[in-house]
Image (tube, rainbow, N blue to C red):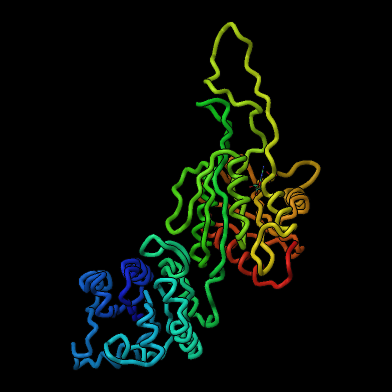
Amino acid sequence: MRIVLGVGGGIAAYKVASLLRLFTEAGHHVTVIPTEAATRFVGTATWEALSGNPVSNSVFDDVHQVNHVRLGHEADLVVIAPATADLLAKAATGQAGDLLTNTLLMAHGPVLFAPAMHTEMWQHPATRANVETLRGRGAAVLEPASGRLTGSDSGPGRLPEPDAIFDAAMALVHGQTDFQLPLAGKTVTISAGGTREPLDPVRFLGNRSSGKQGVALAVAARNAGATVRLLSAHMEVPPPPGVDVVNVETALQLREAALAAAVDSDVVIMSAAVADFRPADISDTKIKKRDDTADPVITLVRNPDILQELVERRNQGIAGPAAGGQLIVGFAAETGDQHGDVLAYAEAKLQRKGCDLLVVNHVGSDKVFGKDTNSVVILARSGSEPQEASGTKADVSAAIISRIGFELNQVSPRA
Ligand code: C5P
């Protein structure tokens, strides 16, 4: 496929080098056209080296090839990233002062804008009108992601992650014209990893959760356009970039963080392995090993069920977005026995906990923990057919996030 990648003059231009890589590695022929301002952020040499093609933004270079007409005409896809307020305005008003804007006027195929700018610029009525004009003409304009901006402030205006732009571009080429990132504008809280319950200053009761599934979910939700809060218990993998991280250790700390984050979250996903019990007493000093004392006995007390509490608070209207129901997703690691199979137990758990979706892992001795692959069944409280998903944890996460997107677009209120 022939792709024109137009790069606008914003700091996010550096991320577009990764997007270019994704296109070329997928075998596409990419011509990069940076604006004059874009080359102040990332130089022409970078675009030429990564694309393997000459780079210019002048209508007066290689005039004999009539680039200002040919490039747009031949392109199967034009992607503009970052689409700055200036570029959106120029495109909306049909200006043709340089090679990129000429190319946009000549484009016959799909055109995708991935905006990035400061929140106030994005929300300015002028930009809103330009975006509406472009969408009205059939161009796809992504919602920018929310989060940290160039300075210390944050809000909508971040360039969507390169793989999210890549996915959107491929969807557009395959005829999906009315798409938006499925979780654009949504806040998603995800707990991940395993809690640790201290016995004394050096020992704890823990579990084998690696956090890989929770992190893969955070990446998938972020790529789907959501603002992601990752409540990280103990994890063997680092949190991904582009998400807000709250570190916790124990179930009680996770409870506090989850209840606080849930207040204004559209979606809460409890993928953490939460300890059901904790030691009743935590010794201030290391429990000593002495020959003259009896073997220590550890008394355990139950931890609160955070998932259940989240559901109760949502049902009471204490938590969740003002505009509608909050979607709550639980995880279950189940085994079957002589009284019932995995799904029967999972179904009972779904009803007991009252969450909207329950992602069920079939746990064998070494099937899930720490592995890079997973196989799950997604059960819905609405009673719709169980849905299976398997593959890498990224594949499984993509299926879960796309199911969440689908459920959020159903109008019926939850609770
Ligand atoms: O009851 P069970 O532990 O099998 O349920 C698993 C689900 O409940 C997971 O989503 C887990 O994150 C959540 N959970 C919780 N609080 C607990 C125990 C589990 O939120 N104390």
The C terminus sits in image quarter: bottom right
Question: At 42% across and 76% down in the image, what residue appears?
Answer: 121
| Residue closest to the eye, 282 or 296 | 282
- Residue 265 visible in the snapshot: yes
Residue 14 in the figure: left or right of residue 330: left
Question: At 23% across and 90% down in the image, what residue appears?
Answer: 59
Which quadrant of the frame does ligand 1 lie within? Answer: top right
Question: At 36% across and 85% down in the image, what residue appears?
Answer: 75
Relative height, residue 366 to residue 147 (above, below): above
- Residue 2 visible in the snapshot: no
| Residue closest to the eye, 158 or 103 | 158
Q: Position of residue 81 (x, y in %)?
A: 37, 75
Q: Residue furthest toward the top?
A: 292
Residue 26 in the figure: left or right of residue 197: left
Name the quadrant containing residue 160: bottom left
Residue 317 in the figure: left or right of residue 252: right
Q: Position of residue 381 (x, y in %)?
A: 75, 60
Name the quadrant containing residue 107: bottom left
